[in-house]
Image (cartoon, rainbow, N blue to C red):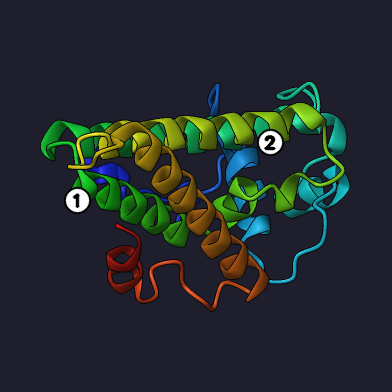
Amino acid sequence: MSDSETASQRFTDDETAPARKRPRPGERRLQILQTLAAMLEQPGAERVTTASLAAKIGVSEAALYRHFASKAQMFEGLIDFVDQSVIGLIRQVTDREPAGPVQAGRIVALLLQFAEKNPGMSRVMIGDALVLEHERLQERINLLFDKVEAQLRQSLKANDSATPTADAQVAASLLVAFMQGRLQRFARSGFKRLPSEHLQAALARML
């Protein structure tokens, strides 16, 4: 899949493929991750258990563990998708836009659009879905936002300023906090308050 397609990419399928008695290698694993993502998209969804996940798919809990060593590993699969998508979106922007405020704003916009199209992933990105799960999962999400902030700093260093490095650090930190706030509001509103709401006007005030 090309980078230009990544922004609209959804992890869960909108169309259900015909049932197959014996899924091909990797199919069941993908189905488990897609079902987990779909369950996280339900407004007000409580913590997903392996029992509820297995019931949703129509298999035993033991069947889940034939594909994943633990539930934490299932969430790591979702985080891998988020990480690869975010890095792809950033690369898409930096390859096409010169460094500066426009580049930074474009990165923020595409990441929020990605979360908007993948509501379940927005809960992963803010750590809401990771509560009571293994702490390394939250550490991976923290690292992801650290990488985003580092890229925003790099983008904004080109800004014409007497103190470009210090100003870029402040602006990048503000943009990351803004993104996290928008994602939290999106999840806590039952996915009604969209992250892209009045986005360009908000970016214009920050950049």
Q: Give the residue drawn at x 63%, y 50%.
A: 126
> Dot 1 lies on which element?
helix
Left or right: residue 107 versus residue 144 is: left
Examine the rendered structure and indicate whether residue 33 appears above or below residue 87.
below
Residue type of the residue flagged with mark 1 = Val
**Can you identify the residue that label 1 sits on?**
102
Q: Which residue is mark 2?
A: 75
Residue at (55, 60) in percent of width and height: 183
Query: At numbered mark 2, what does the secondary structure look like: helix, strand or loop?
Result: helix
What residue type is disc 2 on?
Phe
The answer to whether residue 8 is seen in the rendering is no
Disc 1 versus disc 2: nearer the observer: 1
| Tally of marks | 2
Q: Residue at x 39, y 75 (%)?
A: 197
How far from the left and from the top, in percent, is residue 54?
A: 79, 45
Sequence-wise first label, 1 or 2: 2
Q: Quadrant of the C terminus?
A: bottom left
Dot 2, crowdedness within 10 Å: few (<14), some or many (≥20)?
many
Instruction: Decide: is 72 above or below 39.
Output: above
